[in-house]
Image (cartoon, rainbow, N blue to C red):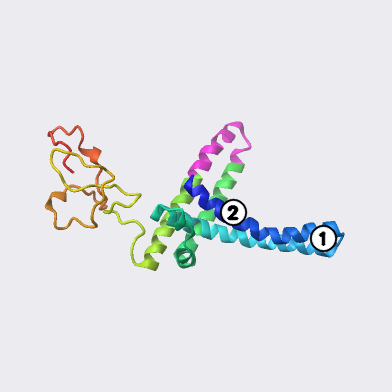
Amino acid sequence: MRHTVVVMGYGLLLTLALAIPGLLVIGGGLGGSEGLLLVGFLVAALLYFIGVLAMAVILPVATGNFVRADSIAAGFDRDVLSSVGTNRTMLMAVVMAFAVNIIVSVGATVLGFTIIGYLAVPFLAFVGQSAIMYVWARGFADAYEEEYGEPPLAPTTGTGGTHRSGQATTGTTSSVDEQIGDSYTDDPSRSNDTDDDGFGTSAWDDVGDSDGDSGQR
């Protein structure tokens, strides 16, 4: 729901941009001026095309930054929008996502010719949207790291999108929301707390172990 607020915010901006030529169209129609009416339609079509292209670039960046900071305001961060949105890696991700969308649309059209295929369209749409979101996420993460020198989400911190772990304890389990530091290099008790990718393991991984370990993380 909070992400919908971000999307609606940009949709409102696009609507306001189209309101100006819309007034020209209305004015031309009421005044009987065919020239003003034609100009209004042409300007509206041009602004709509530009707006769609802008939204195709802005929304992935706004969504990625919203997830990174877990804040609606981050979705409207002009510095991130201008830097990451113009990054070549991010632009390539936008193009790739657009290509995926075309492939899914064509596939859905072909499946729609049969009853069985038509029933499969929602599943294809889900897979396609998941693929698009993945491309957006990878593009944003790589572009953000190129621009700011660090990944948007560090795998061993308590930032949203990763496992959160508290300090090592024996015989007790700490809250998954407990904040931690950025590194456990000097803490030998953390040796078994990360997987091969460096992400913290879940507190639930140790529940029910046969060796009797009572939640040590």
Q: Residue at x 18, y 44 (%)?
A: 217
Q: Is residue 6 left or right of residue 14?
A: left
Q: Position of residue 211 (x, y in %)?
A: 12, 34
Residue 112 is covered by the magenta coloring: yes
Q: Are marks 1 and 2 in contact (CB under 8 Å)?
A: no
Q: According to the image, label 2 marks what residue? A: 11
Element assignment for label 2: helix
> What is the distance, in whole Å, between disc 1 and disc 2 at their CAs?
26 Å
For the residue marked with disc 2, what is the amino acid?
Gly
Q: Residue at x 59, y 54 (%)?
A: 11
> Where on the picture, by quarter, is residue 201?
top left
Q: Position of residue 32 (x, y in %)?
A: 87, 59
Q: Residue at x 50, y 57 (%)?
A: 96
Q: Position of residue 111 (x, y in %)?
A: 59, 39
Q: Nearer the viewer, residue 171 or 212?
A: 171
Q: Which class describes the residues within 10 Å of circle 1: few (<14), some (14-19), or many (20+)?
A: some
For the residue marked with disc 1, what is the amino acid?
Gly
Q: According to the image, label 1 marks what residue? A: 28
Q: Which class describes the residues within 10 Å of circle 2: few (<14), some (14-19), or many (20+)?
A: some
Q: Nearer the viewer, residue 195 or 41?
A: 41
Residue 47 is covered by the magenta coloring: no
Asked if residue 36 can be seen in this view, the reply is: yes
Q: How many marks?
A: 2
Q: Nearer the viewer, residue 50 or 62?
A: 62
The magenta-colored residue range is 110-127
Element assignment for label 1: helix
